[in-house]
Image: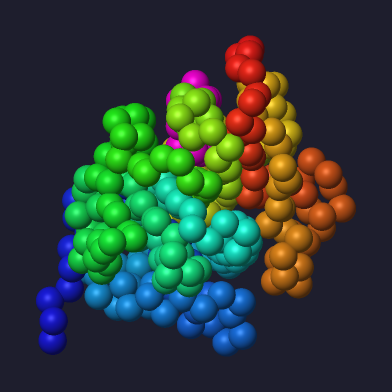
Amino acid sequence: MNEKISTSKLKGVPETLLLPLRGRYLETTRKNGFINDPKSVEIIDSIDHNFESADMPWDGQMVISARTEILDEATTKFLDENPDSVVVNLGCGLDTRIERVDNDRVLWYELDLPECIELREKFFSENDRVKFIPKSVLDFSWIDNIEKGKKTLFIAEGLLVYFHEEDVKKIIFAIKDNFPDSQIIFEAYSMLIKKSWHRHKKIKSAFSMFKWGVNTGKSMEKWDRGIKFITEWPYVDRHCRRWKWMMLFKLVPRLRKIMKIVHLQFPVQAARAKI
């Protein structure tokens, strides 16, 4: 039997990369699951981590599965419209999206903390089109590692919520100022989410580290004239019956967008006017 791969170097926020991995595994192995991610099954079966002692509640699994589906669809649409483009996966962890959406033409960058990239290298390899960047997203020297001059999509799944608003702004402005006409799709929660998940000891630790939330991505246009809100996709709009009693959130505007993916664009000619 092959020796299991240790995850002991993951502490604090980096350890949360195991949550989406577990969620995708559970949905993939579920009968009639709505995502199919065999790479996550392969990784879960290969790592040394006791998931059974801290497994995931059904609603946490739905959050991860819905956001996976939405981000996959949005990324695929971007690649269909811009086949020779660049995708930068911020805080990639053990994300497997490249396995599902690769068009054999995109230049794809996986960026995360060194300990996360070290673990990622156990399961994924770099090549001419897939590059790893072992840096913090707040170490903006990573900008120099990205090829410029192409349509660029940034993905931030399960990342920005762990930063204070001033750091979220730094990230957004760094992208806007260095990658004209780029786009970003990212997970955003209302801060109500911290209260709604306090009952789940199994994932409470992750939600307790949340520092930033926004009721709607539309409000981020106030940060700068160079930020254009495109749309947002609430999680509860997906596979309604699977949300059980939480499907009622759809009837309350404030609750419908409590969990969502936001899509922003940074137009080329927009003048900067921070507030």
Q: Is residue 172 visible?
A: no
| Position in image of residue 258 (x %, y %) | 69, 45
In this picture, is 6 found above or below 15?
Answer: below
Q: Is residue 109 visible?
A: yes
For residue 57, side relative to residue 99 (left or right): right
Residue 53 lies in what quarter of the image?
bottom left
Q: Residue at x 72, y 65 (%)?
A: 238
Q: Residue at x 72, y 70 (%)?
A: 239
| Position in image of residue 208 (x %, y %) | 47, 40
For residue 199, side relative to residue 138 (left or right): right
Q: Residue at x 20, y 66 (%)?
A: 122
In this picture, is 173 found above or below 89?
Answer: above
In this picture, is 78 found above or below 162?
Answer: below
Quarter holding the N terminus is bottom left
Q: Which residues are magenta?
A: 158-169
Q: Nearer the viewer, residue 52 or 119?
A: 119
| Position in image of residue 94 (x %, y %) | 35, 60
